[in-house]
């Protein structure tokens, strides 16, 4: 039986609840700065999140909600410019400390690192957003805690495609059964499963609680902290309500035994 070797983390919605008060706010700031009358409400953004990738999301919005808007000849360049401005607004928002890590994330990452588990990021978001989040929550040195930061356009196809997880495992020389993935959404679950990773822990958030998360080994409302236990909507939560390394190793062993 393969032992658990590595933890592969999604970012948005998993490490931190970044979408409603982070990315969405940054998109709207970039639109206003460009003199556009586009505004993504919390509800509309929840709908647009079905499309991963900020540039892809902008184009999806135009196709589905603004057929009236005539894009310039260099549509890709226009959207890329808007997205770059959005990334500046987002990283500035992170630098102001406006987006904390989700409960239990820092403890789990530090405990995993101390125990010698290998760590990686597998995300659709832009790389600068990852390093900014890590810097302004765990400190700049934490960037080096992750052997691979697989992010954004590094792969041809974004989640729900499996590319980003396959890329991370290839870079680390790992097989799927040596890994556990952490996700928050339907697109993330599909990406992990497509990459052949069988052990998957999902923590839901306001935007993903109603997602189809079939295939996850366990679905929790959070990782849990002492006095604030997590609750499971799929699978079995840790007995004490807090996800720790013993729980993860037992879950990984159980998932592989069931698959054998
Ligand atoms: C979530 C995404 C990203 C973010 C916005 O990524 O789909 O597109 O919403 O970031 P994940 P960008 O859950 O895989 O971390 O604008 O940089 O794409
Ligand atoms: Mg996510």
Image (spheres, helix red, strand yellow):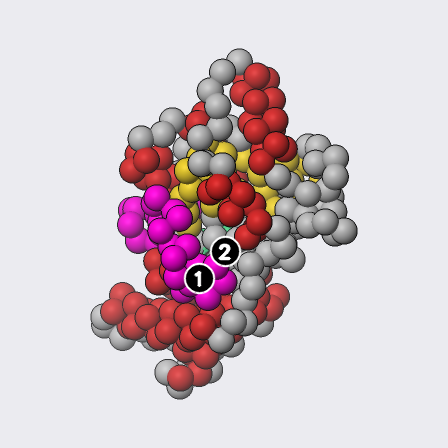
Q: Is residue 116 left or right of residue 234?
A: left
Q: Which residue is mark 1?
A: 139
Tell me if residue 141 is in the magenta stretch. yes
Residue interval drawn in magenta: 132-161
Q: Is residue 186 left or right of residue 134?
A: right
* Comparing labels 1 and 2, the label whose residue is closer to the camera: 1
Compared with residue 103, is residue 84 higher up or lower down, i.e. above or below?
A: below
The image shows residue 101 at horizontal and vertical percentages of: 55, 59
Foreground residue, 164 or 52? 164
Where disc 1 sits, the SS reads: loop
Q: Give how far apart the Cα atoms at labels 1 and 2 are.
A: 18 Å
Q: Is residue 41 left or right of residue 3?
A: right
**Furthest residue in direction front, as rendered:** 114
The image shows residue 85 at horizontal and vertical percentages of: 35, 75
Tell me if residue 203 is in the magenta stretch. no
Looking at the image, in which quadrant does ligand 1 appear? bottom left
The image shows residue 62 at horizontal and vertical percentages of: 42, 67
Q: Are marks 1 and 2 in contact (CB under 8 Å)?
A: no
**Label 2, residues with CA under 10 Å away: few <14, some 14-19, many ≥20:** many
Residue drawn at point x = 35 percent, y = 58 percent: 127
Q: Within the image, what quadrant is residue 73 found in? A: bottom left
Residue drawn at point x = 32 percent, y = 35 percent: 172
Residue drawn at point x = 35 percent, y = 44 percent: 147
Q: Earlier in the sequence, mark 1 or mark 2?
A: 2
| Disc 1 C-beta below 8 A from ligand 1 | no
**Label 1, residues with CA under 10 Å away: few <14, some 14-19, many ≥20:** few
Residue drawn at point x = 45 percent, y = 72 percent: 95
Q: Which residue is mark 2?
A: 12
Q: Within the image, what quadrant is residue 69 found in? A: bottom left
The image shows residue 228 at horizontal and vertical percentages of: 74, 52
**Furthest residue in direction left, as rendered:** 74
| Disc 2 C-beta below 8 A from ligand 1 | yes
């Amino acid at each position: 039986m393969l032992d658990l070797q590595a933890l592969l983390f999604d970012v948005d919605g998993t490490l931190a609840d970044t979408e409603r008060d982070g990315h969405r706010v940054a998109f709207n700031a970039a639109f206003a700065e460009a003199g556009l009358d586009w505004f993504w409400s919390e509800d509309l953004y929840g709908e647009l999140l079905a499309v991963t990738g900020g540039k892809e999301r902008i184009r999806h919005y135009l196709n589905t909600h603004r057929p009236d808007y005539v894009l310039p000849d260099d549509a890709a360049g226009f959207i890329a410019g808007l997205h770059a401005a959005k990334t500046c607004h987002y990283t500035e928002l992170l630098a102001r400390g406006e987006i904390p890590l989700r409960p239990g994330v820092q403890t789990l990452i530090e405990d995993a690192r101390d125990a010698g588990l290998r760590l990686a990021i597998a995300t659709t978001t832009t790389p600068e957003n990852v390093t900014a989040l890590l810097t302004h929550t765990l400190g700049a040195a934490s960037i080096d805690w992750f052997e691979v930061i697989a992010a954004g356009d590094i792969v041809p196809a974004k989640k729900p495609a499996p590319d980003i997880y396959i890329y991370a495992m290839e870079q680390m020389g790992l097989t799927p059964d040596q890994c556990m993935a952490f996700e928050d959404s339907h697109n993330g679950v599909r990406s992990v499963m497509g990459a052949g990773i069988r052990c998957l822990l999902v923590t839901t958030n306001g935007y993903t609680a109603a997602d189809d998360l079939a295939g996850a080994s366990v679905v929790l409302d959070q990782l849990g902290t002492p006095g604030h236990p997590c609750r499971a909507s799929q699978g079995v939560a840790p007995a004490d309500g807090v996800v720790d390394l013993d729980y993860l190793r037992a879950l990984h062993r159980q998932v592989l035994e069931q698959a054998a």
